[in-house]
Each structure stands twice: as structure tokens, then as C-alpha cells.
Image (cartoon, grey):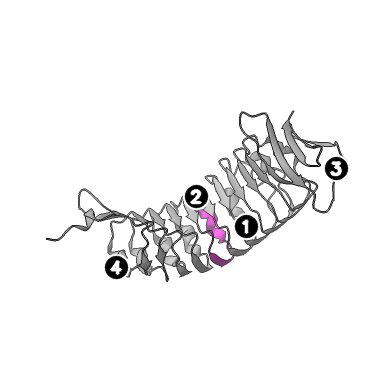
């Protein structure tokens, strides 16, 4: 007696046609390659095989899965280049490829997936530039390309994606300056901006306070110069602020601004002494003051 695959662990089938619609084989210790026959599952909408021990490249047969909405291959030891054919999946909303060994450049074709909401490519070996056409992803909410070897500047089109809530480009080789108006009505829902450990230069964007929903802002270990914008204190939702090891007048390691609490504290230090304040001086940051405590640290508190 043959058992239907619909009864197998991790397999979900549709009630009408009994065709496989979802595979959840995560955390099962699987090894080997993904067989090209996977492309025969034409009704598949979700493919989750994260946290396994696969190896090799992704098969081009994935392009046949035209109904896919979710691909999650994180932490699965894949290598090689990401097949450009993934950019032909018209219904894809979430693409998770982080923590593998993918290499080469980021396929420009991924910018054609108009419904994409999550693009997670962090902790791989991608090189080259961020595709300029990434601004075409007008439904994108989370963009993660951290911990790669990406270079060049950030395409300004990223800052026009009004749906973005998370941008993580930290730990790359990105350079250039950040546009002063990056938050001018373009990123109303942005909650996290991680750009630390790159080679950005110039001044901090003066209008960054206009990203009013920011909770996490990390710009540490870059080549920024100048002073911290005074209006940064208007980020009332901010929980953590990292500006450590930049060539700023004051380098803040972390500021925690907790909702419903009056005080927020920060550990800080100077890099080269440039712009160092005299003991007892205070800097007004839009209702929150940065002043030195008895040990020379920075204390942030509300007026």
C-alpha cells in the first residue's frame, strides 16, 4: 500500500488537488544537494529548508516554481552564485539566503521581484556593487546585506523605498557619503538602520531625525567627520545609538532611550580628542542633554 507524500513530516498539501503546497524541512540534519526534481512541485508556495547541511549550488529548476511566495535557505551551507532565474518568480515575497557561502555579485534580476518584502543576503561572500535597480522593490520592508564584501556607494534609490523598516548593510566595504535628505518623507516607517563597519565619510545626515520611527541606529566604525546633529535628540523612539570610533566631536558607544523612562544612559569616549568638551559642559540634543559624569563618561538625560 502506497502512502501519500501528503502525510510525510514537513509536507503540506492543498485540500482540493492534494498537491504539495509547502515544504518545511528545517532543522532536520539533511545533507547533499537540492535535487532538480524539486522544480516539479509546481503548486509549491513555501520552501523552508533552513538550518541543514546541504552543499553545492542552487538548481536553476527553482525557476519553475512560479507560485513560490517564501524561500528560506538560511544556515544551510550553500555555495556558488545565486541563480539569476530567481528574479523571474512573480509571487515571491520573502527570500532568505543569509548565513551561507554564496559568492559572486548580487543578481540584478532580484530587483524585478516586485512583490518582494524581505531580502536577506547577509553573511555570505557577495562582492561588487549593490544593484542600482534595487529601488524597484517598492514593497520591500527588510533589506539585509550585512557581512559581505560589497563595495561602492549605496544607491540613493534605496532611500526612496518608503515601505522599508529595516536596512542592514553593516560589515562591508561600502563608501561614499549619506544624503542629507535621506529621511525627508522617504522612510516614514524605518525602525532600524545598520551601516557600521564600512568606509562611509562626510558628515552625518542633518535630517536623520526625520526618520521618526528609528529605534536602532548604528553608524560606528566609519570615517564620518563633523559633529553629531543636535536634532538627533528628537528621535524619541530610539533605543540604541552607536557612533563609536568615528571622527566626531563626541563618539557615543550606545544610547538607550527607554519609553516611559525619564533617563537614558550612554557610554562614550573620544577618539583623537578633536572637539573635546571641557569638564562639566553639556550639549543640548533636542531636549536630551549630553553631559559628562564624574568619571568622564557621557550621560544622556531629558530636560
Q: Which residue is mark 4?
A: 37
Cβ atoms under marks 3 and 1 closer than 8 Å: no
Q: Earlier in the sequence, mark 4 or mark 1?
A: 4
Q: Which residue is mark 1?
A: 154
Q: Earlier in the sequence, mark 2 or mark 4?
A: 4
The quarter of the image holding the C terminus is top right
How far across and down, in percent of the image, does residue 259 sit?
Answer: 61, 32
Q: Which residue is mark 3?
A: 277
Query: Would you say 217 lies left or right of 135 here?
Result: right
**Badge 3 local density, few (<14 within 10 Å), some, or many (20+)?**
some
How far is the residue under mark 3 from the one under mark 2? Answer: 42 Å
How far is the residue under mark 3 from the one under mark 4? Answer: 66 Å
Q: Which residue is mark 2?
A: 140
Query: Would you say 116 lies left or right of 172 here?
Result: left
The quarter of the image holding the N terminus is bottom left
Residue extending farthest front = 295
How far across and down, in percent of the image, does residue 41 sit?
Answer: 28, 61
Q: Earlier in the sequence, mark 3 or mark 1?
A: 1
Q: Which residues are magenta?
A: 122-137
Query: Would you say 48 lies left or right of 290 here?
Result: left
Q: Earlier in the sequence, mark 3 or mark 2?
A: 2
Residue at 57 percent across and 50 percent down: it is 167
Mark 2 or 4, closer to the camera: 4
Cβ atoms under marks 2 and 4 closer than 8 Å: no
Q: Tell me if residue 130 is in the magenta stretch.
A: yes
**Badge 2 local density, few (<14 within 10 Å), some, or many (20+)?**
many
| Foreground of the two, 8 or 230 | 8
Mark 3 or 1, closer to the camera: 3
Amino acid at each position: 500500500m502506497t502512502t501519500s507524500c501528503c502525510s510525510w513530516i514537513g509536507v503540506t498539501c492543498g485540500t482540493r488537488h492534494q498537491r504539495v503546497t509547502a515544504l518545511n524541512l528545517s532543522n532536520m540534519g539533511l545533507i547533499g544537494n537540492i535535487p532538480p526534481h524539486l522544480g516539479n512541485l509546481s503548486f509549491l508556495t513555501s520552501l523552508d529548508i533552513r538550518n541543514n547541511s546541504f552543499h553545492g549550488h542552487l538548481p536553476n529548476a527553482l525557476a519553475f516554481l512560479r507560485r513560490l511566495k517564501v524561500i528560506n535557505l538560511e544556515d544551510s551551507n550553500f555555495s556558488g552564485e545565486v541563480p539569476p532565474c530567481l528574479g523571474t518568480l512573480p509571487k515571491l515575497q520573502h527570500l532568505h539566503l543569509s548565513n551561507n557561502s554564496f559568492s559572486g555579485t548580487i543578481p540584478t534580476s532580484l530587483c524585478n521581484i516586485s512583490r518582494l518584502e524581505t531580502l536577506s543576503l547577509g553573511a555570505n561572500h557577495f562582492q561588487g556593487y549593490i544593484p542600482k535597480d534595487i529601488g524597484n522593490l517598492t514593497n520591500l520592508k527588510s533589506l539585509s546585506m550585512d557581512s559581505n564584501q560589497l563595495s561602492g556607494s549605496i544607491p540613493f534609490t534605496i532611500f526612496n523605498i518608503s515601505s522599508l523598516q529595516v536596512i542592514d548593510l553593516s560589515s562591508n566595504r561600502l563608501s561614499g557619503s549619506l544624503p542629507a535628505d535621506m529621511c525627508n518623507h522617504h522612510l516614514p516607517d524605518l525602525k532600524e538602520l545598520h551601516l557600521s563597519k564600512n568606509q562611509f565619510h562626510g558628515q552625518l545626515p542633518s535630517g536623520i531625525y526625520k526618520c521618526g520611527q528609528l529605534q536602532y541606529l548604528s553608524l560606528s566604525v566609519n570615517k564620518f567627520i563633523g559633529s553629531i546633529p543636535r536634532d538627533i535628540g528628537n528621535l524619541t523612539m530610539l533605543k540604541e545609538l552607536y557612533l563609536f570610533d568615528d571622527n566626531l566631536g563626541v563618539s557615543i558607544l550606545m544610547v538607550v532611550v527607554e519609553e516611559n523612562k525619564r533617563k537614558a544612559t550612554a557610554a562614550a569616549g573620544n577618539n583623537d580628542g578633536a572637539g573635546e568638551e571641557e569638564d562639566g559642559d553639556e550639549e543640548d540634543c533636542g531636549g536630551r542633554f549630553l553631559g559628562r559624569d564624574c568619571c568622564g563618561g557621557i550621560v544622556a538625560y531629558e530636560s
